[in-house]
Amino acid sequence: MEAKRSTLRAAKEKLRQFEGNQAALKEFQLSKRVHDSEPVSTPAYEKYHYLTAPAGVLPLPIHYQHLLDGFGACDTVVSMFHNRKEICRLDKVSSAVQSITRHDFGLSHLGKILHVKPEAYLVSVEEHRFLDTAERKHHILSFVNPPNGHDPKFVMERKNHFKDKLLLRVAQYHQEFLDKEMPGSDVPVEAIKRWHPKFLLDSVPDIPVKDLPQLQKTAQIVNAQQVLEKVRSKFSVRIEKALETLVEKQAQEKRNNDPNESSMSPICSMLHGVNHSLLERIRKKEALKMAEKMVINGQDEKERRVLQALPRLVRTIRQVFLSSKKATLPYPDLVAKIRESGSFDDIEALMARVAELAPEWYKPLMVRNAKYVKIDKDRDVNSLCERVERRLKDMVSSKVR
């Protein structure tokens, strides 16, 4: 009778161990199903957000912008804890930042912030007791140089300084791209008003995570191999074989997912046989146009468009006078005929610009409160157009240098 009782107790003990390991195996399968799910692609409104940035404002990659928003929200939360003289826990900051920005924020994001701005926070692991958690050790955040009282400029200045550091980091990758795409060009960083059109902004590498003190955690079972090592020699042979089969299956899937050979970029056969010097001239011309777009500001862009439209307007004015066979034309009639000949934006401003750049050829007159226009038909129009084109070229070259 005593032998039967001992056998029953041993069977109950094995059953309890089996149920515990079954729960661990089920948790592992659930976590594997989550990790094996396909990654969510980035929405288009986030991927191409920089295309809607106003002129003269250098946009950040979307992951850099999220980090900047998280830093600003984190500064706000930490300053609130500081003003209330409370201990600032990372888990409290993370939940508050996530509710503000609607994006994840944790220890890894804090490590990226400290990699860019090491003097941003002091992060330590301290032992405290709180009523809302049973944990004893926590990550504690504090300012290196805390503000005196309630100073809203403190948070804004820190955010602007952090944004400048992010822009400088993106500018370094942009300069590497320019060295490959436009070799020999010397575009200063402070003169860039927008990124190169071919520069893939959201392909900028992510910021590394700085090593921070970690909380000690108990060992967790994360794969079938660990389950097998833990329960080996405790279960029946059939259960051990099932776990070994699962381990082999996972190893086979991992081998199948590893890329065996790198994909080679296809060689464009359309350029075969094209003169190399011609290609170099085309690339230099394209590089000059791209450099011009990067350094020109809003006022210079408006001036450039005016100068580009002037040669066509000058030729149109001369053609109108030749077709009318008159030495002088009323200004409204001239403007009306120019509108019929082609589309020009803000003809009034363009006509005034012609009078400023070519006063010896284009001569506005006032007769009895009526405005007339007279031109010198004997003067070469091509020389006037060349003068305007030289001025446009000088403006672009002065900006690119």
Image (cartoon, rainbow, N blue to C red):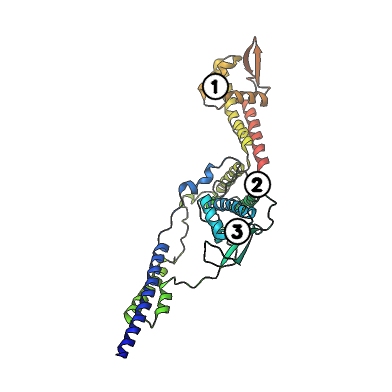
Q: Place residue 192 in its image quadrant.
A: top right
In primary-sequence order, the first of circles 3 and 1 is 3
Residue drawn 61% across and 66% down?
Answer: 126
What amino acid does circle 2 point to? Pro
Query: Mark 3 or mark 1: which is in front?
Result: 3
Q: What residue sits right under mark 2 in the picture?
A: 152
Residue at image location 49% in from the left, 73% down from the top: 219
The residue indicated by pointer 3 is 88
Up-down: is 43 above or below 358?
below
For label 1, the residue is: 338
Q: Give the mark toward the camera: 2 or 3.
A: 3
Q: Residue 10: percent from the left, percent from the top?
A: 35, 84
For label 2, the SS is helix
Identify whether 218 is placed above or below 73. Answer: below
- Label 1 residue SS: helix
Element type where label 3 sits in the image: loop
Give residue 321's position: percent from left, percent from top. Answer: 58, 18
Where in the figure is residue 128, as x and y percent of width and height?
59, 66
Q: In this orientation, does residue 153 appear? A: yes
**Do the residues bearing badges 2 and 1 touch, measured as CB atoms within 8 Å?**
no
Q: Marks 2/3: CA distance? A: 19 Å
The numbered mark, 2 or 1, whose residue comes first in the sequence reads: 2
Q: Is residue 103 left or right of residue 83?
A: left
**Frontmost residue, 312 versus 299:** 299
Q: Nearer the viewer, residue 267 or 46?
A: 46
User: Which quadrant, please, contains the N terminus?
Assistant: bottom left
Image coords of residue 249 (percent x, y): 37, 72
